[in-house]
Amino acid sequence: MKSDLVRKWFGKDFDKLDPLLQKLHILGGELSGSVDISYGKGLSGFIGKRLAHKIQLPKKGHHKIVVVIFFSKNGLHWKRQFNNNNIVESLFTSVANNKTRFWIEKTGPLTMQLTVDIINGAWVWRCLNISLFGITIPLWLIPRLHSSKKIVNGQYKFQVAFSYPLLGNLVSYKGVLETKFNDL
């Protein structure tokens, strides 16, 4: 199903995104390939594994991934399937008015309020707020999110990393994926 949800949220800034990211966020589609998942060491690894378990990520290592992106009346859906097994689903709903503009991502018990910066055609998430099981967590307590997606040589390249100051990487995953767009 074609949707203008993302285009409307960005407004005139939508044209700053790479054309293939624009197309993916209008038509939806499927991304496939492999992803590398890593955890920190010591305490940061322990925290990262607990966080990853909450959002249903598989264990450390190299995994196959298929991501299906589609729209419904509820918003933008991302269904990630690791190794034909672990399924991680997110629903993104948009909030945009004269005063503020952000996305709400719900993944299992985790809800994040996110905004987007466009840097050299890439989509870079910036976390504004996180709640777990409906309880807001103070920003100074939450892991830092570093998340982006861009097109490199016609392929979708992404990274998602959660870290804490002084502890470093908790959990991260990244990959380069092939893209198939939904038909008009």
Image: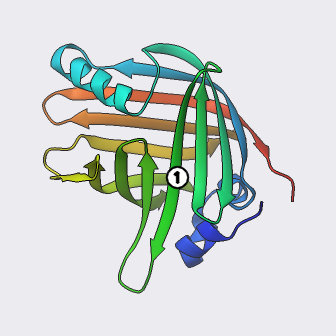
24 to the left or right of 125: right
Kind of residue indicated by mark 1: Leu
90 to the left or right of 155: left
- Quarter of the image where the N terminus is located: bottom right
> Under tag 1, what secondary structure?
strand
Residue at 45%, 26% in the rendered image:
57
Q: Nearer the viewer, residue 123 or 112?
A: 112
Percent x, y for residue 85?
Answer: 60, 21
Percent x, y for residue 150?
Answer: 58, 46
* Direction right: furthest residue: 184
How is the protein colored in the picture?
rainbow
75 to the left or right of 131: right
The quarter of the displayed image where residue 161 is located:
top left
Percent x, y for residue 11?
Answer: 57, 77
Q: Is residue 124 above or below residue 172?
A: below
The residue identified by callout 1 is 91
Residue at 60%, 75% in the rendered image:
8
Residue at 73%, 57% in the rendered image:
23
- Quarter of the image where the C terminus is located: bottom right
